[in-house]
């Protein structure tokens, strides 16, 4: 069989993407962990909650979702009539991968009568087994809402621990998942860095390990981290999340010194999400041109996964 013809790409990819966006009546939604040039082209850049909300309000024919699979899948669940494409279908997430639906179903069955609160970083099949979804920006609020009920919380154990503290609960039943990116921050190296920058504020994402979170001045979602970095009186910010958030902070507060929290292994770029960064400008162009790879969710599964997402949006 002949090898496939090489993909011919236009010289000015940005212009070509904008032209295709018009032609397709498409909207580009992007997470803060995307490459700067993708964020610059997006109609909406946001955290998981903002992107779910944006997906709910879309009125275009096509959504080009620059993020990871569970985010695009959520957009499809909220928009069954629209075409949802992603630059790279392989852009997954260690939290979603570490919580297979069949095992999660057994876990839930072992705790009958519990309200199942699941972080949005999971598959549609896991969402369908949940009572309500949450993101890092509303998890504590949602857990507090169910204060009088036993709770199963999945799939991030670090977020669960932080949320339990915030909500004053010591009885959450927790699925023991974690994020490969946020677990790489080193509490020991962070302590050393803070000695060198005594006036710096430390801003951390709740997916980080407890020993890192214990050193943080603020624990928040990516949007919360960006907002605080811009508003803070501190000139230097040490940031314990993926450095894609630096792009917005630099635009909004160019005079701030931004330092990414150190990793366990400084020889690798382990604090860059390997899944998010699979998306490139070239692949964004191709997905708008070819309307593939397309994100699909079977109708029956979609119906089951929709209710817990809508419940989250109602409670947020
Ligand atoms: P946010 O909801 O804070 O954007 O987090 C998403 C995520 O995947 C963090 O790793
Ligand atoms: Fe998943 Fe972690 Fe990447 Fe966020 S940073 S998408 S939680 S692997």
Image (spheres, helix red, strand yellow):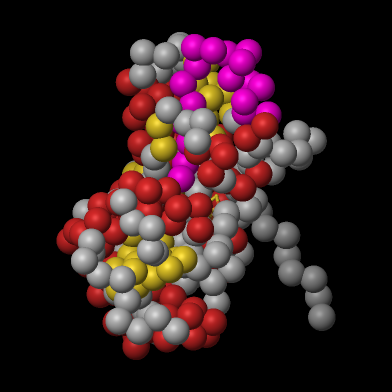
Pick the residue in front: 85 or 5: 85
Compared with 181, 160 (above or below) is below
Q: Is residue 59 visible?
A: no
- Give the residues drawn in magenta, as a range: 189-206
Compared with 81, 64 (above or below) is above
Residue at 62% across, 25% down? 191
Pick the residue in front: 272 or 277: 272
Residue 191 belongs to magenta span: yes
Q: Position of residue 194 (x, y in %)?
A: 58, 20
Residue 278 belongs to magenta span: no
Residue at 34% across, 29% down? 227
Residue at 39% across, 70% down? 152
- On the image, which quarter does residue 42 sit in? top left
Quadrant, the C terminus: bottom left
Q: Position of residue 94 (x, y in %)?
A: 59, 61
Q: Position of residue 162 (x, y in %)?
A: 42, 48
Residue positioned most to the front: 170
Quadrant, the N terminus: bottom right
Residue at 35% across, 36% down? 224
- On the image, which quarter does residue 275 sit in? bottom right
Pick the residue in front: 254 or 149: 149
Q: Left or right: 24 with respect to 241? A: left
Q: Left or right: 211 with respect to 302? A: right
Q: Position of residue 151 (x, y in %)?
A: 34, 69
Q: Left or right: 286 with respect to 251? A: right
Compared with 122, 300 (above or below) is below
Q: Is residue 232 visible?
A: yes
């Amino acid at each position: 069989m002949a090898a496939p013809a090489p993909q011919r790409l236009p010289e000015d990819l940005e212009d070509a993407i904008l032209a295709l966006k018009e032609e397709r009546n498409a909207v580009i939604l992007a997470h803060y962990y995307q490459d700067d040039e993708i964020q610059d082209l997006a109609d909406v850049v946001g955290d998981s909650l903002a992107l779910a909300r944006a997906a709910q309000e879309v009125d275009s024919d096509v959504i080009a979702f620059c993020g990871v699979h569970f985010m695009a899948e959520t957009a499809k669940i909220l928009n069954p009539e629209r075409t949802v494409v992603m630059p790279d279908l392989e852009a997954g997430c260690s939290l979603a991968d570490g919580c297979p639906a069949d095992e999660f179903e057994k876990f839930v069955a072992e705790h009958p009568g519990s309200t199942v609160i699941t972080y949005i970083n999971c598959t549609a099949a896991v969402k369908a087994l949940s009572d309500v979804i949450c993101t890092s920006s509303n998890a504590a609020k949602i857990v507090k809402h169910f204060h009088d009920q036993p709770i199963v919380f999945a799939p991030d154990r670090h977020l669960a621990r932080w949320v339990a503290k915030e909500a004053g609960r010591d009885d959450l039943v927790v699925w023991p998942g974690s994020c490969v990116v946020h677990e790489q921050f080193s509490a020991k190296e962070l302590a050393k860095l803070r000695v060198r920058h005594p006036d710096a504020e430390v801003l951390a994402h709740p997916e980080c390990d407890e020993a890192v979170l214990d050193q943080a001045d603020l624990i928040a979602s990516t949007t919360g981290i960006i907002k605080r970095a811009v508003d803070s009186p501190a000139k230097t910010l040490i940031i314990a999340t993926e450095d894609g958030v630096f792009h917005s902070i630099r635009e909004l507060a160019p005079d701030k010194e931004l330092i990414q929290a150190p990793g366990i292994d400084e020889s690798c770029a382990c604090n860059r999400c390997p899944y998010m960064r699979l998306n490139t400008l070239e692949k964004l162009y191709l997905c708008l041109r070819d309307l593939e790879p397309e994100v699909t969710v079977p109708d029956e599964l979609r119906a089951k996964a929709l209710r817990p997402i809508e419940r989250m949006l109602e409670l947020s």
